[in-house]
Amino acid sequence: MIELEIQGLSENREGLLIEVGRLVMASGFTLQRQRLQQDHHGILLTMVVRGPPRKKRTLEAALDACDRFISVKVFPFVEGEPNPHFAASPKRVGSAAVVPPAVAVASTAAVHAATPMAEDRIRNVEPVAASAPEPPREPPAEPEFEFILPTPRASAPAPAPVVTTPFVELVPLEPDAAAVEKALRELEYDYPQIVPQLLALAHSVAAGARESSLALAGQRAGAWVFAREYALDDGLDLREAIEHIGTPALRALVEVDQQGAQLHIRDSPLCTEDGHSGCSFFSGFLEGLLGPAIAPGGLSIFPVCCRSYGADECVLAISD
């Protein structure tokens, strides 16, 4: 498997992550993380994806054919070595005006060229008969001038440099089982109003254990909901399980819309705009909820995009 970094420039951000995420999945790659950033040139998209080496050309062709991009490039991704975005506005550096050498040479040549002509005119002037010298006259008194100094203008403030925030990769940690147990100890009484407990859980554990702890909490909550409400609904195929179990159960927590095998979550209270995603809870919730209901087979839940990274909504793609 290889990891690639996709850098693209687009005119607008609406639906951009969803559309590019679908191209990535269709090309055989999985999304590791993504970022949207506003720039003077437009919207800067950065994605890190993972997939088989033989699919690289397929991915590049799909991205080149995407009408959403003004320009797009694909680079090999190396952990710990962030690449500056190719379309980001560069920092402005002031520079003194320099006279090009060619202009200086041309000016010197013009002076030399004009000198012979002036000498010729001096030679061709006829001598004027000498006349009696006039007595010297006193020059008229010149008026005194009052010099008015111009008011200095305030210099324009220097433009703020464009700073690109690099990726900060957290070391993933095991879930904090004790913290999860504490957050869900009153689940049977609190459900479905459990968002405050989940937010408290996300802030109480170490940063590296945030996603894994939310995923564990989701698995336990999903299994509990299945045992309480859907225990008789087993042996379903994936599409039936999403439609009859997954979507109704999620609607008790958030506003969700089903589009085929994708669930679009609007205004997720667990996914803030500071890059802290809570989609791992919803993925774990669906695993615990749908796993016992689906006929024998695996269940894979892939986060296509997240509101915390600038997307308009959170999208989870489910496959078996």
Image (cartoon, helix red, strand yellow):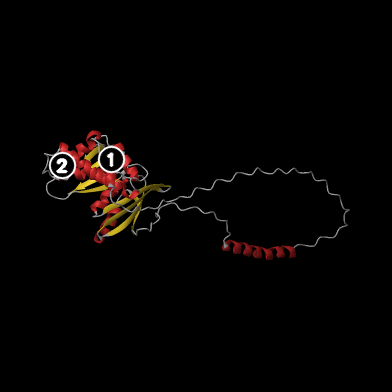
Q: Which residue is mark 2?
A: 241
Few, some or many residues within 10 Å of mark 1 (<14, 14–19, 20+): some
> Which kind of residue does numbered mark 1 sit on?
Ala
Nearest the eye: 234 or 114: 234
Q: Quadrant of residue 224?
A: top left
Query: Measuring 27% from the left and 54% from the top, which residue is drawn there?
Result: 62
Estimate the x, y position of residue 71 in percent, counting from the top left: 36, 53
Identify the disc placed on residue 183. Answer: 1
Nearest the eye: 99 or 141: 99
Q: Quadrant of residue 294?
A: top left
In terms of secondary structure, where does tag 2 sit? helix
Q: Earlier in the sequence, mark 1 or mark 2?
A: 1
Q: Quadrant of residue 268?
A: top left
Task: Please tell me whether residue 13 is drawn above or below residue 104 in the rendered image.
Answer: above
* The N terminus - image quarter: bottom left
Estimate the x, y position of residue 157 in percent, counting from the top left: 54, 46
> Which kind of residue does numbered mark 2 sit on?
Ala
In terms of secondary structure, where does tag 1 sit? helix
Estimate the x, y position of residue 73 in percent, counting from the top left: 34, 56
